[in-house]
Amino acid sequence: MNIGDVAILSGLPAKTIRYYEDIGLVKPLRSSNGYRTFCERDAHRLAFLGRARALGFSIEDCRSLLALYGDEKRASAEVKEIAEQHLQRIDKKIAELTEMRVTLSFLVDACTGDHRPDCPILADLAMKQSDEEQPNQ
């Protein structure tokens, strides 16, 4: 099948499929005229990648998960470890976003939003970080 057909089957845009080919996640055959020829296995791998990316797995995680998926002697512990590490990154990001939301919500509530120039939002954004909050250089 051609790239348009596999795009429909996998639910991925052709541009994404080409990118996945460029980075070696899929390796379709090439016909004598140079066109990509995808098989059912390629469509399945692409759908797998689409679902993994939708769950936020990195490209390298996807590469590892695909390798494990294709390894009949895999240990599910390896798959679980990848998923647990990703879940930890998600939890960390949620905590960071929650903290940002609390701060921004406080600033929005503190701003009168009237015709006066005083604005706690701008004042906060202009504040220099204290020495203990600055990252090490």
Image (cartoon, grey):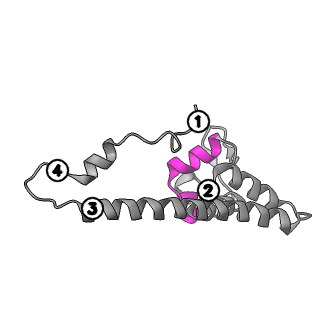
Q: Considering only order in the chain, which callout, 1 or 3, is on the residue closer to the N terminus?
A: 3
Tell me if residue 92 can be seen: yes
| Tag nearer the camera, 3 or 2 | 3
Res 103 quadrant in image: bottom left
Q: Considering only order in the chain, which callout, 4 or 1, is on the residue closer to the N terminus?
A: 4
Q: Considering only order in the chain, which callout, 1 or 2, is on the residue closer to the N terminus?
A: 2
Name the residue rendered at 61%, 37% in the picture.
33
- In space, the residues marked 3 and 1 are separated at their CA atoms by 30 Å
Q: Name the residue beneath numbered marker 1.
A: 136
Q: Name the residue beneath numbered marker 2.
A: 1
2 and 1 marks in contact (CB < 8 Å): no
Name the residue rendered at 26%, 65% in the picture.
109
Amino acid type, callout 2:
Met
- Where disc 2 sits, the SS reads loop
Which numbered circle lies on residue 56?
none
Amino acid type, callout 1:
Asn
Which numbered circle lies on residue 118?
4
Residue 123 or 88: which is nearer the viewer? 123
Would you say 6 lies left or right of 24 here? left
Percent across and percent down for residue 92 are: 59, 60
Amino acid type, callout 3:
Val
Percent across and percent down for residue 38 are: 65, 53
Q: Name the residue beneath numbered marker 3.
A: 108
| Tag nearer the camera, 2 or 4 | 4
Percent across and percent down for residue 90 are: 59, 62
Q: Considering only order in the chain, which callout, 4 or 2, is on the residue closer to the N terminus?
A: 2
- Where disc 1 sits, the SS reads loop
Residue 2 or 69: which is nearer the viewer? 69
Name the residue rendered at 71%, 60% in the picture.
85
Question: Which residue is the extreme one toward the front?
Answer: 131
- The part of the chain drawn in magenta is 6-22
Position of 58 relative to 31 (above/below): below
